[in-house]
Image (spheres, grey):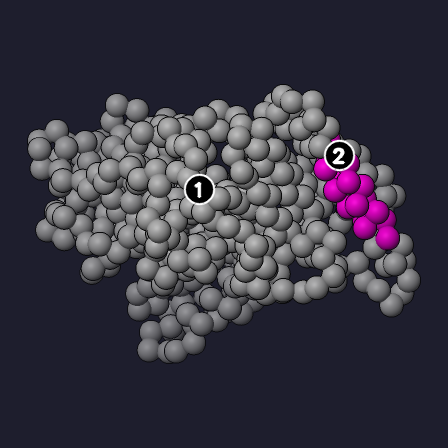
Amino acid sequence: MSRIRELRDTLFIGPRKDAELYHRIFVVSAFGGITNLLLEHKKTGTPGVYALFANDDNGHDWLDGLTRVADAMREAHSAVLDHPADLTAADEFVRERIEGARSCLFDLRRLCSYGHFRLSSHMMVIRELLSGLGEAHSAFATTLLLQRAGVNARFVDLSGWRDEEEHSLKERILAGLDQVDLATEMPIVTGYAQCTEGLMREFDRGYSEVTFSNIAALTQANEAIIHKEFHLSSADPMLVGEDAVRKLGHTNYDVADQLSNLGMEAIHPNAAKTLRKAGIPLRVTNAFDPGDPGTLIDDAPAEAPAAEIVTGLNTYALSLFEQDMVGVKGYDQSVLEILARHKVHIVSKGTNANTITHYLDAPLKAVRRSEHDLTEKFPNADVTVQGLALVSVIGRDLNGLNATQAGLAALQAAQITPLAVQHLPGSVDIQFLVAKDDRDRAIKTLHRALIEKPAASGTQPIRLERKAPPTQAPETGFQLSNAS
């Protein structure tokens, strides 16, 4: 979004003229870094306005946080807008939203100074209100930019700002698009939608793709497109090298789900489920390579068996060993209840007669709390935590490739010792558990053995490279885009 000015001339307009510009809906996220300032930094955990407000007793830190957000918003839209009238309108938009949020938080803190009201019960509403500021700002600025370029763009604010009525997500979307003429207008829609379901409560910061997918389903779009800063590739090009990676070109929703499970989302799993159920194909493109059709994600089977992606992440192996477990029911359920209580993400698991091991993607603090509760629940059991790396080879069809054997042989040749291997019958991934320090080497080794070498020998299956969609969508529908 911070490069939206560059995208104006390619993604939004490009060679299109007049009616060819329309029949498209764009769902936008906030400018880079804004949501981190509003909530908390996604990677470092540095507190934003929300975290400061939740933990601040003197009422000053969160005010300074709001000021930093306002400054960052003005800096962001000043980098993409150049007409004085547009800059004035954007500055006023920021002032009105920030001052409104400041007044709201002041009033709420004052209300909660009375014993009958608890601030804790309102924190999720505050998180939603703050989050919506970022998307509303970027959508408004993008609309101004496009209007100045001659596009009949329309700002569609789903954030519920000063709305006195409650709506479900479906109602909110339909109300926002009710008066839009898709044949003559280009809706620029906020990625956050205020609704009774509470997107933040269920999806936290994955809400924009949930909004995007629901708009696609409700409007029966021809195709849903996510524009990213890179192609969906066979591995991280920074790790294995740009010359070594392969653009996927075509894959399916099962592969997308596995990527999501490993924390490398092509799309939020709930959003993928919505598109899949509606029968709408998803395309992931590189926004800065407009001539490339990107990667199509649908339910079509693979043309031939092949490994498509190699990726990995660090995990904690939480193991429960109980000699008396064999033949006794209830252990697995009890472990899952404890893990659910501490909100840890289960990447994979393995069991045998007397051991249950869960591979977790979670903060060490949450894992240690889970370990403590398991020890109390099963005092005679041996509960251990070990830091490992899970490296996964993923493909729509891995049958007949002997990928497990080939992967093990490649790791052995590279002097990497797998600590565990899992490949369920019919599954789309093979998981190799290795030492944390071996993760990157294992990814490069498996990518070289299972993707680069088959491609070099000419055994790589033909990839489906569909032509770029027409600049003017058919009369029966349109395209929906998400600038992520």
Relative placement, left or right, of 66 versus 330 is right
Q: Is residue 419 visible?
A: no
Q: Which residue lies at the image location 86% right of the left edge and 59% below the top edge?
A: 112
Relative placement, left or right, of 423 versus 119 is left
Dot 2 or dot 1: first in sequence order is: 1
Q: Callout 1: helix, strand or loop? A: loop
Query: Measured from the top left, where is residue 42 in percent x and y?
Result: 57, 40
* Residue 92, disc: 2
User: Is 241 one of the magenta-colored residues?
Assistant: no
Mark 1 Cα-neighbour bin, 10 Å: few <14, some 14–19, many ≥20: many
Query: Measured from the top left, where is residue 93 in percent x and y?
Result: 72, 37
Q: Which residue lies at the image location 87% right of the left edge and 43% below the top edge?
A: 58
Residue receiving disc 1? 22
Q: Name the magenta segment's main secondary structure.
A: helix
Q: Is residue 121 visible?
A: yes
Q: Callout 2: helix, strand or loop? A: helix
Query: Measured from the top left, where is residue 248 in percent x and y?
Result: 26, 39
Relative placement, left or right, of 390 versus 86 is left
User: Is 105 one of the magenta-colored residues?
Assistant: yes
Q: Is residue 426 above or below residue 377?
A: above
Query: Measured from the top left, where is residue 266 in percent x and y?
Result: 39, 45
Q: Which residues are magenta?
A: 91-107
* 467, 196: nearer the viewer: 467
What separation in Å lies between label 2 and label 1 (alpha carbons)?
A: 28 Å
Q: Residue furthest bottom?
A: 328
* 369, 184: nearer the viewer: 184
Q: Which residue lies at the image location 36% right of the left edge and 63% below the top edge?
A: 277
Q: Amino acid at mark 1?
A: Tyr
Q: Amino acid at mark 2?
A: Glu
In this rendering, which labeled residue sits more in front, label 2 or label 1?
A: 1
